[in-house]
Image (cartoon, rainbow, N blue to C red):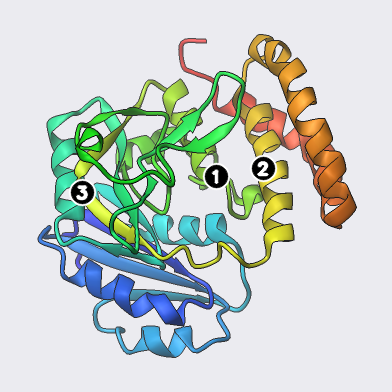
Amino acid sequence: MDKMAQISVVIVTWNAKRFAADCLESVFSQTAEGLEVIVVDNGSTDGTPELLKAYSSRIRLIENRENKGFCYANNQAIKIAKGRYALTLNSDMVLDKNYIFYLKEYLCENPKVGMVQGKFLRMDKSTIDGLGLRLSPLLRLFNIAEGKKDSPKFNNSFEIFGPCAAAAMYRKELMDDIKVGDEFFDDRFFFLVEDFDVAWRARKKGWKAMYVPGAVCYHYRQSSEHHSAFKQYLSFRNRYFMLIKNESPAAFILALPFLLCYDLPRFVFLLIKNPYLPKAISEIYSYLPELLQRRRGTKEENA
């Protein structure tokens, strides 16, 4: 590991043998200098650990015996990261050679910006996978421009709610500023919506997020068709985890009619097909005291 590293690249793998080599090779091909690469494997059983060991001289590898979740694994790496910036990177992403350079350059030139992402394209290289996170006034979650055809109108930088953690760069100062204990990502989320939660906590501290169009990467989307019932459960649960932790009571009450109109029919529909949904409701209730405690721990400094 480079003790003089300026940028820590953090990759979490779980049964990612199909993609991990492409991801790592794209990192090693970056024009940016001063990188350290930390990989956390979450108990893969498909040969991923053996593949990663072939890169042992170029990465720092942490091996978990079981799947601890995206959040926990990222936090493991962040605790030992040495860089002034950290890039969280999904194992099914492939970076253009200048991706890290452009993100770091933007952060260096814009000290009030604490988190950035580039242009995510799907593997056809013409369809937008996402340009950043958006939280609507009615508290719905979106990836900006997802599914649209790439065009010159997406070649200008603009402010976003936050970056998608699939390939997001964060300042170390931001990460230290919003940690609760030693957690940057909230371990309770496991995965999904954790990047919205991080972005919201950072925005309450005054940090800005930007989309940087010159930085381009490509997304295989490893698990889009797998474990859909489990993902629905996590998405439903974690959205409410995030709202309880971050939204003001007044805004939550104003949005409540929409939440009921949108979520109640959706919940009833999913309940018929998804055995995890009652567990989501139970966990929202059981975690409520901890979520409220974390809310108090991340209030804006001038509140």
Q: Using the image, determine if residue 119 lies above or below residue 113.
A: below
Compared with 292, 270 (above or below) is below
According to the picture, the residue beneath numbered tag 1 turns out to be 194
Q: Amino acid at mark 2?
A: Asn
Image point (49%, 89%), residue name: 47
The residue drawn where x is 82% and y is 40% is 267
Separation (CA) of disc 3 from disc 1: 22 Å
Marks 1 and 2 sit apart, C-alpha to C-alpha, by: 8 Å
Can see residue 194? yes
Where does the N terminus fall, quadrant-wise?
bottom left
Residue 82 in view in this figure: no
The image position of residue 232, as x and y in percent, is 70, 51
Helix, strand, or loop for circle 2?
helix
Position above or below: 300 against 68? above
Give the mark nearer the N terminus: 2 vs 3.
Answer: 3
**Which numbered marker is on residue 151?**
none
- The local secondary structure at tag 3 comes to strand
Secondary structure of residue under mark 1? helix
Q: Position of residue 226 (x, y in %)?
A: 63, 67
Which of pointers 3 and 1 lies earlier in the amino acid sequence?
1
Residue under label 3? 215
The circle on residue 238 is 2
Left of 230 or right of it: where is 183? left
Image coordinates for residue 120, horizontal then vertical, percent:
33, 51
Q: Quadrant of residue 3?
A: bottom left
Pointer 1 and pointer 2: residues touching (CB < 8 Å)? yes
Q: In this orientation, which residue lies closer to the viewer: 188 or 25?
A: 25
Tell me the crowding category of disc 2: few under 14, some 14 to 19, or many 20 or more residues within 10 angstroms, Cα based.
many
**Residue 23 horizontal/vertical position (percent):** 32, 71
